[in-house]
Image (tube, rainbow, N blue to C red):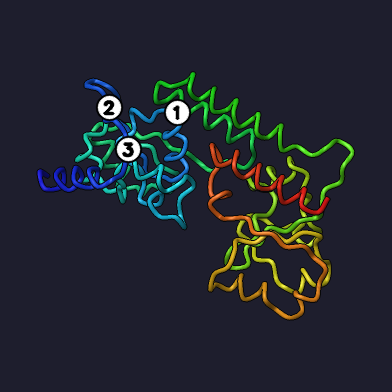
């Protein structure tokens, strides 16, 4: 255990501009999920002692890496949580049952941040998490910032936004009931006909796009996966569909990510006007 604690301390020392450690007697929180990482970094930075390893990965986190590296990263093991002297862990609903059982036996409470399907649900989650860590006022301040950004990104009332498809890596579309789809609607981007009836995680075949092309195709950006190869298909290049990159880091999570995502989507929307 001493070795684990030493490794944890060395990892913390390697971070640039590390966060101040919690004061004596103050709640110590380990976050095991990139979405809770970003929220806690805003509402309870002085109580946060570790973030998930995803937030140290530019391709997997939902907050700027330079910000995330103020805190050491953890893979989510019980040993690491103990080494951080955590009083609370915040995790997703995918937390392994064995890890949850061990934390329960050790008396370390776990706050579960589930998946939200709409902006309103996500704002409620921000409030609930902030309240759980004793930072209700900071939670309300973050919600107010998000609501201000959403209002600023809203389209003119008399405008009709483009029919849009968000093509995620692997040819997956978010489908109805996804947080990002609600956000897209709020900034005036309407789901294209080809995606109607599809649920979260469904694949959208190229043929469906060719039969009923969208006005706007959002994609995750250049990579070597199937999605990027599909985007280069000769039949797709013949369409008049406008394309724009929408980084996955903007739709992995809600919370503070909603601010940057709304700004980016509004900018894309306005590029054609």
The residue lying furthest to the right in this view is 158
Q: Quadrant of residue 206?
A: bottom right
Query: Which numbered disc, 3 or 2, marks the residue that appears first in the sequence?
Result: 2
Q: Which numbered disc, 1 or 2, marks the residue that appears first in the sequence?
A: 2
Q: Tag 3: Cα neighbours inside 10 Å, few (<14), some, or many (≥20)?
A: many
The local crowd at label 1, few if under 14, some if 14 to 19, many if 20 or more residues have their Cα within 10 Å, is: many
Which residue is tagged 1? Answer: 43
Picture disc at residue 30: 3
The correct choice, above or below, for 246 with respect to 238 in the image is above
Q: Give me the residue at 55% from left, 72% from top.
A: 225
The residue positioned 42% from the left and 33% from the top of the image is 40
Most foreground residue, 85 or 224: 224
Is 209 positioned to the left or the right of 249 in the image?
A: right
Alpha carbons under labels 1 and 2: distance apart: 14 Å
- Residue at image position (28%, 33%) is 108
Q: In this rendering, is residue 266 above or below 205?
A: above
User: Would residue 240 be found to the left or right of residue 54 on screen?
Assistant: right
Give coordinates of residue 164: x percent, y percent: 76, 56
Where 172 falls versus 23 (above or below)?
Answer: below
Judge the density around disc 2: few (<14), some (14-19), many (≥20) Cα neighbours within 10 Å.
Answer: some
Q: Is residue 27 above or below residue 178?
A: above
Q: Are marks 3 and 1 in contact (CB under 8 Å)?
A: no
Question: Residue 172, position in %: x, y?
Answer: 62, 63
The answer to whether mark 1 and mark 2 are in CB contact below 8 A is no
Tell me which residue sits at (65%, 42%) in the image. Answer: 263
Examine the image and state in which quarter residue 123 appears.
Answer: top right
Q: Position of residue 71 (x, y in %)?
A: 32, 41
Look at the numbered disc 3 and give the secondary structure of its residue. Answer: strand
Instruction: Say which of 189 and 91 sits in front.
Output: 189
Residue beneath disc 2? 22
């Amino acid at each position: 255990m001493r070795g684990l604690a030493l490794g944890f301390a060395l990892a913390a020392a390697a971070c640039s501009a590390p966060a101040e450690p919690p004061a004596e007697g103050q709640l110590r929180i380990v976050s095991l999920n990139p979405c809770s990482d970003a929220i806690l970094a805003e509402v309870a930075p002085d109580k946060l002692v570790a973030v998930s390893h995803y937030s140290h990965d530019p391709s997997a986190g939902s907050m700027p890496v330079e910000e995330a590296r103020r805190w050491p990263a953890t893979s989510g093991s019980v040993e690491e949580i103990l080494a951080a002297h955590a009083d609370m862990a915040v995790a997703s609903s995918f937390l392994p049952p064995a890890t949850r059982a061990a934390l329960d036996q050790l008396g370390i409470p776990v706050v579960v941040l589930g998946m939200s399907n709409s902006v309103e649900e996500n704002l409620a989650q921000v409030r609930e998490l902030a309240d759980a860590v004793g930072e209700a006022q900071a939670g309300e301040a973050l919600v107010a910032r998000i609501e201000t950004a959403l209002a600023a990104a809203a389209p003119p009332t008399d405008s009709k936004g483009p029919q849009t498809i968000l093509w995620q890596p692997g040819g997956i579309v978010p489908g109805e009931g996804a947080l990002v789809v609600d956000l897209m609607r709020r900034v005036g981007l309407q789901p294209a006909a080809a995606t109607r009836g599809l649920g979260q995680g469904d694949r959208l075949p190229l043929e469906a796009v060719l039969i009923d092309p969208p006005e706007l195709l959002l994609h995750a950006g250049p990579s070597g996966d199937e999605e990027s190869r599909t985007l280069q298909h000769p039949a797709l290049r013949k369409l008049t569909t406008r394309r724009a990159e929408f980084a996955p880091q903007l739709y992995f999570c809600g919370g503070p990510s909603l601010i940057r995502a709304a700004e980016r989507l509004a900018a894309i929307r306005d590029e054609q006007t």
